[in-house]
Amino acid sequence: MRAAALYSAAGSLLLTALTAAPAGSTPVAPDGAEQQGTVVAAARAKASGIDFGTCADAKDMPGSLQCGTVSVPLDYAQPGGRQIKLTVTRVKATHKDPHNSKRHVPRQGALVYNPGGPGGDGQYFPLVGLIPQWKRIAAAYDLIGYSPRGVGRSAPLSCEDPKRFFKAPSQAPTYPSESYKQERIAQAKAYAQGCAKRSGSGLQYFNSLNNARDLDVLRAALGEERITFMGASYGTYFGAVYATMFPSHVRRMVFDSAVDPAPDQIWYRNNLIQSAAFESRWADFRDWIARHHDVYGLGKTAAAVQHSYTKASAQLAAEPAGGKVGPAELQASFLQAGYYDDYWPTRAKALSAYLKGDPKPLIDQAGPATEAAAESENSNAVYTAVECNDAPWPTDWKVWDRDNTRLSRVAPFETWDNAWMNLPCAFWPAPQQQPLDVRTGPGELPPTLILAAERDAATPYAGAEEMHRRLSGSTLVTERDSGTHGVAGGPNRCINGYLDAYLLEGRLPEQSASCAPHPEPKPAAPGDRSHPTPAKESLKGKAARR
């Protein structure tokens, strides 16, 4: 069942009404000066290349990982002006066929990856070549990761003191009072002002158009005439912007969990639709818990599981677990389970243990990762800057209040949390752009591959369909009845087969195709230590929304 059909009739009608809210106007093409500036910067990067060497944190990295930098203009309209350095990582093609040790695999070029966000850091991507599902691709391609502008060491953005970033424990009212709303408005204004104060006059240049230009400079620095690129989540959006701006520079492109690129959806409407989709994914998770009531004891129906969750949230509001896990931390922890179903067993186990008197698993999973405060604050700053800079947002609080109040009646799980996440855009101090009309005509762009899970909440399936319509010659491959965000190189062999065929042979199905869902996770009993904690657990904190 497609994502567009996941919502109740009331929810669908409501979203139709909400998307009439003013959140932008007619998109325009990139400025000619910036186009010329990109040509200048790319030529300069091609001449200098990238001097790859030992990584600064080499003691923690496999020896095959190399690091370097590439310089790009802060403002492409002034290519000779201030330059910023982007951190780039590489693992060279192994040339080793994992199924035939005697076969030498020819190099096909560089495969550049972006994990999304905005604010995601791709510098560790090349290490995926150590994973079995990626070995064939790693044999043929130099795997390239990088930290986009603003992220990590790449001219890092900051909007507040990282020591103040985690404000745990926090409340998360499903139906906030007027006084609470005023508190959050004040916080949003202060955050927006902090972004301007800590980031200076260059704040406006952290946007998707410049991310696409940076990608072209990186392509040139790598010595590639045409780029092979894989973007996940938000990475699909600026990848599509790149495809629109530089179609002749594309060799192959993979869009994994595609964002709806329609200009009138960027970004206010996309966030409303995302909140509605998370309600459906939360229902999927509750159904799964209910089917395993014998393990967790949280209820035999989705409604009963909701009651258990609501009970835990109320208890945490009265007395935070360990003094640091309140309702907001609980909600953020369970939101991660909306992204990735491999979180389901550990989250359900923690909730069950908490309601039975043992708060430790919940504290471990939902407590603020203070050791990662600087990284989390930076990621959040980049997310906010890019989304706020990319497009106009409603500046009247009454619009936000109306739309989110209506939506929360049918989709309470994520609606207000998403609104607070994005509210600084209502008070943004930097100039806001008009989104590019992402679109390519027949023959302009080589065939591209779009991958999507049918019940993905972070990037609802209708967005993948829109991306498919806008990129002529693209093919959409769907993982049916599944909601994991990001499917490339995961547990679904069918999806990976299409990915390998495309990247290694340039082969796509003649028409859009689909795959059966990957198996649901197996439950983990409260005393069971055999179920591993998801690898993504190390990235605890306020996750970027795409």
Image: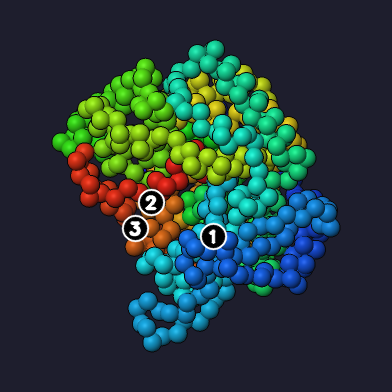
Which residue is disc 3 drawn over? 491
Which residue is disc 1 drawn over? 57
The residue depicted at 27 percent of the width and 52 percent of the height is: 519
Q: Nearer the viewer, mark 3 or mark 2?
A: 2
Amino acid marked by disc 3? Pro
Is mark 3 in CB contact (under 8 Å) with mark 2? no
Which residue is disc 2 drawn over? 535
Q: Earlier in the sequence, mark 3 or mark 2?
A: 3
Secondary structure state at the residue bearing disc 2: helix
The residue depicted at 73 percent of the width and 34 percent of the height is: 197
Q: Earlier in the sequence, mark 1 or mark 3?
A: 1
Compared with 200, 448 (above or below) is below
- Observer able to see residue 481: no
- Observer able to see residue 49: yes
Place of residue 162 in the rendered image (x, y in percent of width and height, measured from the top left): 58, 37
Compared with 523, 40 (above or below) is below
Quote the CA–CA distance across marks 1 and 3: 30 Å
Amino acid marked by disc 2? Ala
Secondary structure state at the residue bearing disc 3: loop
Place of residue 64 in the rendered image (x, y in percent of width and height, measured from the top left): 50, 71
The residue depicted at 41 percent of the width and 55 percent of the height is: 487
Place of residue 362 in the rendered image (x, y in percent of width and height, measured from the top left): 33, 34
Horizontal side, residue 378 vs residue 284: left or right: right
| Crowd around label 3: few <14 · some 14–19 · many ≥20 (10 Å) | few
Count every numbered label the image shows and give the total.
3
Q: Earlier in the sequence, mark 2 or mark 1?
A: 1
Amino acid marked by disc 1? Asp
Nearest the camera: 182 or 479? 182
Q: Quadrant of residue 278?
A: top left
